[in-house]
Image: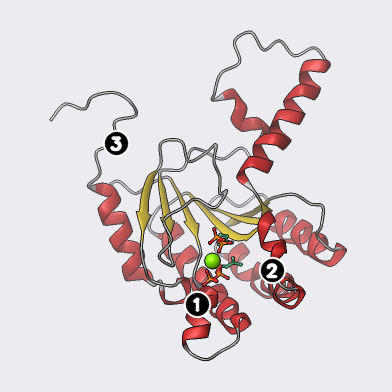
Amino acid sequence: MIVPNHVAIIMDGNGRWATNRGLSRSAGHLEGSKTLEKIAFHALNMGVKYLSVYAFSTDNFKRSKEEVDYLMNLVVKYFKTKADKYHKKGIRILISGRKNNLSDIVLDSITKIEKLTENNTNGTLNICLNYGGQEEIIDAAKKLAEDINNGLNIKDFNRNDFYKYLYHELPPIDLLIRTGGEQRISNFMLYQLSYSEFYFTNTFFPDFDKSEFNKAIFIYENRDRRFGGINKC
Ligand code: IPE
Ligand code: IPE
Ligand code: MG
C-alpha cells in the first residue's frame, strides 16, 4: 500500500448537513470539528505524514457575522481543548493563512498551539484559516521580491525553490479530497496541488468517516500518476 505523503481535505458541507436536519449551520460546524479530529488521527496513524485541511477561507468573511463569529470561537475552543491530545500523539500543528482580520484571541490561540507542538515528529496537521491560495502565492511573491531587493540571485530559481516562500514549507499534495458534492478548488492550496490526484464525494463533511477516508486512499492507490511522463506497464 502506498500511503500518500500529503493529503488535503476541503471540509465542505457542514451547513447543508445541519440544514437538512433542521439544525443551525453552527451545529454543522461543531459536528464537522468532531469529524476533523477523528479523520486527522486516523490519517496520521495510517502513515500520512502531512494532512492539510481547509477550515476557513479568506472569502468566508462574506458570511454573516454570526456564522463568522461562531467559527472563530470554535477554532479558539478547539485549539484550547484539543492541544494536549494532539501534542501527546506527537502531532505538529501548523496554521496557514493571513493574520490580518483575525482577532487577538484567535492569534494568541494559534501561537500557543504552534509553539506547544513545534518539535513533534509523528505527522503534521496544517490547518488553513483565513486562507486563500492566490493570497498565499501573492504573499510568497512579496517575500521573494524582498529577498531579491536584498541581493538574492534568482538566475537558477526553480519551482521547488518557491515552496520555502509559502506560509509553511510543505511538500506537494498527493491527494485532494473534497466532501459536500462540489467539484471545485475554491482557492485552496493552488501551488501545492499542481500534480495532486482529486477525489470528490457527495458526503457532507460531518458524515465523512474513516471508511470513506480509506475508500479515497484506495482509489488514490489505483491512480496512474505520470507527472507528464510515461509509466511502463
Ligand atoms: C464548510 O462547510 C466549512 C466552512 C466553509 C467554514 P460550509 O459551511 O461551506 O457548508 P455548506 O457548503 O454551506 O453546506
Ligand atoms: C471552501 O468551501 C472553504 C472551506 C471548506 C473552508 P466554501 O463552501 O467556502 O466554497 P464555495 O463557496 O462553495 O466555493
Ligand atoms: Mg460550502
Q: Residue 57 or 168: which is nearer the viewer?
A: 57
In this rendering, position of residue 92 left or right of residue 67: left
Instruction: Answer with the quarter of the image where residue 227 lies.
Output: top left
Q: Is mark 1 within 8 Å of ligand 1?
A: yes
Residue wearing tag 2: 63
Nearest to viewer (mark 3 / mark 2): 2
The CA distance from mark 2 to mark 1 is 15 Å
In the image, what residue type sits under mark 3? Arg
Q: Secondary structure at mark 3?
A: loop
The CA distance from mark 1 to mark 3 is 33 Å
Q: Secondary structure at mark 2?
A: loop
Could you tell me which quadrant the C terminus lies in? top left
Query: In the image, what residue occupies the spot 48% across and 89% down?
Result: 21
Q: Position of residue 30 (x, y in %)?
A: 59, 79
Q: Position of residue 184 (x, y in %)?
A: 46, 53
First in sequence: mark 3 or mark 2?
2
**Ligand 3 position by quadrant:** bottom right
Q: Is mark 2 within 8 Å of ligand 1?
A: yes
In this rendering, position of residue 188 left or right of residue 139: left
In the image, what residue type sits under mark 1? Arg
Residue wearing tag 1: 16
What count of labels does the image hold?
3
Residue wearing tag 3: 225
Looking at the image, can residue 35 be seen?
Answer: yes
In the image, what residue type sits under mark 2? Arg
Q: Position of residue 218 (x, y in %)?
A: 26, 55
Q: Secondary structure at mark 1?
A: helix
First in sequence: mark 1 or mark 3?
1
Q: Are marks 3 and 2 in contact (CB under 8 Å)?
A: no
